[in-house]
Image (cartoon, grey):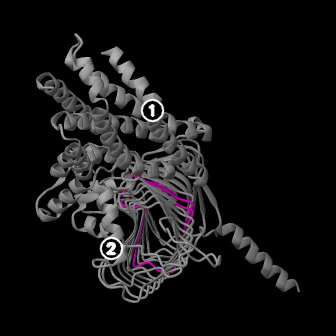
Amino acid sequence: MLKILKYSFFDLMRSSWSYVYFGFYLLLGIVLLFLNNDLSKAVITLMNVIIVLVPLIGTIFGVMYYYNSKEFTELLLAQPLKRSSIFLGQYLGVAISLSMSLILGLGLPFIAYGLLMSNAIWDFSLLLIVGIFLTFIFSALAFNIALSNENKIKGFGYAILLWLFLAIIYDGLFLMSLILFEDYPLDKVSLIGTMLNPIDLSRTLILLKLDISALLGYTGAVFKQFFGTSFGLIVSFLALTLWVGLPVLRIIYKSKKKDF
Amino acid sequence: MKLLFSVLLFIISTCFASSQTTTVCNAGCDFTSIQTAVDSSKSGDRIFIKKGLYKESNIIIYKKSLHISGEEGTIIDTQNNGYGFSVEATDIIIKNLIIKNIEVSYTKEYAAILLFKSYDFEIENVTVENAFFGFLIQKSKDGIVHNNTISGEGKAEADSGNAIHLWHCENIKITNNDVRRMRDGIYLEFGSNSYISDNYSTENMRYGLHFMFSNENTYENNIFEANGAGVAVMFSKKIKMYNNIFKKNWGTASYGILLKEINDAELKHNIFEDNTIGINADGTNRITYTENTFKNNGYAIKVHGACYDNIYSKNNFLYNSFDLSYSGNLNSNKFENNYWSNYTGYDLDKNGIGDIPYRPVKLFSYLVNRTPESIVLLRSLFIDIIDFSEKVSPVFTPENLIDNKPLMTEVTW
């Protein structure tokens, strides 16, 4: 598996898309920091970018990579290799190279700006960790979609729909149900609703460290207990891990059964 | 000439005679008990209490002008029995004392110092520890409460009292006091023409400062931090609030300031930081908010109904989750020339004023008002989209609630 990971990783590292992605984050980081002299405000803007763009790029890139390297995959399948290690290797190759671009692209300008000295370092590292989680989650979901659909157009369609659903439509439905059932106690429902969507969960995690904290008082006790303590942080990270684990398991399961 | 001289001599001699200083200490002084010292003094005398522990309570001073002072280490322990001092006198000074352990009662308002119908008084450098009420001042006039420290140990609003409680008082100066862990830090009921400054009020269960039916008071340069609900100004007129700092008041019903039924007040140069709600205004008329800074609050300002002719100008709204929440119609309230950190407009003619107006009320703040739980969706892409569409064509938020001249740079003062 490691060998395949290595091949995929270096293959991607050589491809121009990784550089474009890296360059985009580098530019974003520089523009945000040097045109905007408030570091914590830059972190908020970055959050907006990360929770929207990282999933989108992860999904599209994952699907694209799978369809592109289909011939190579078929060649590999002819060799005496475990199927799970072929697909996991490819998946990890994509996810790791995307995460690298993210970390380097954002990390370099921030270090140049003097982040290591400032107290925003924890907010920033949380941001990066969340970004990496999102990359792993969404490329795993993309591989799932690609594995289940032979038709490229269909695969891309589903991938974009998935992103659209989790990034925007889910929140709309969530808000509508909250307003519809406003006469009932909604604390727990909204907590569970947040847990069920990795994008919402990541956003809440970052906001907890930033500006939601003053507003916490405004909501009920359940919120305060959950978000105010490290228990909430641990549960949130567990949920994110679960979001990585389940799609990966399905990749293994699906790849074993799939007829090429 | 001789006659005049002798008259003068007589006056001077009587003056000296009338002002005697008696000392109190545990052994070797004029008296060993403060109460007996008080009883045997006459108006104008001084009582000096040397350092030591005095287990006395309910020390009554009735119609005698006394100057009572202690030194460092003079401790009066009331042993949870009634009042510390109970005073009804004019021209009274109490200074440099530590008073401890005031009785908690659910029917009586026991205080370290009770002043009743006292004029020209001065309470200075008094430390009250484990207080129920600190200073209870009733129907008094022209006093100074300066440099005192009052702290309590109450667990709930019901079993704790107020640090400095004024009832039907006039012309009182409350300065440089430190009040903490009480019910209300400073409480004025039917108090007028008072001046409250440079106090530090923190960790109080209810309000840091509380006005009820008290007109024409001024408070400035105070710090109110982490109180149950910040400062409450209710049913009062002509209150001036300058240069105060309100911070870290967090909770479901927590505010920097709660304004209820207030007329003709003025807020200037105050700083509101990290509060759940910076200002909660309910039924306020003709109030001017000038050059205040609202930073990192949940809501900077929350306006409920029945507010008329309020003017908000030259304030800084910096990085609040919501700048403004508004119920009802605009009602001739005015928002003008403020600096909003969320403003995204431009200034082509470079006059320092944004060319497109700013709408401080977001649709999402309206939604959060309806269902507080929807706060989990803060800063989500979907919310940004609906906020934007509301900005373009307002449906739920008041259409004419706009700052027509938003500033491009922060206001400095």
Quick one: B239 or A68, which is closer to the camera? A68
Between the C-alphas of marks 2 and 1, the distance is: 43 Å
Residue type (three-letter) at the residue carrying disc 2: Glu
Query: Dot 1 corresponds to which residue?
Result: A15
What label sits on residue B74 in the rendered view? none
Quick one: A104 or B125, which is closer to the camera? A104
Using the image, determine if residue A152 lies above or below residue A66.
Answer: below
Which chain letter matches label 2? B
Residue shown at 39%/85% (left/top)? B400
| Residue B269 appears in view | yes
In this image, B241 relative to A148: left or right?
Answer: right
Q: Position of residue B295 (x, y in %)?
A: 49, 61
Residue shown at 51%/65% (left/top)? B341
Give yes or no for residue B122 being in the magenta stretch: no
Q: Position of residue B236 (x, y in %)?
A: 40, 81
What label sits on residue B390 in the rendered view? 2
Q: Specify whether disc 2 shares its chain with disc 1.
A: no
- The secondary element bearing badge 2 is classed as helix
Q: Position of residue B153 (x, y in %)?
A: 36, 48
Q: For residue B68, which quarter of the picture?
A: bottom right
In the rendered structure, which segment of residues is drawn in magenta? Answer: B172-199
Q: Are marks 2 and 1 in contact (CB under 8 Å)?
A: no
Q: Position of residue A126 (x, y in %)?
A: 41, 38
Q: Residue lying at the far right in this picture: please name it.
A: B1
Q: How many marks?
A: 2
Q: For residue B163, which quarter of the picture?
A: bottom left
Residue shown at 59%/77% (left/top)? B353
In this image, A161 relative to B56: left or right?
Answer: left
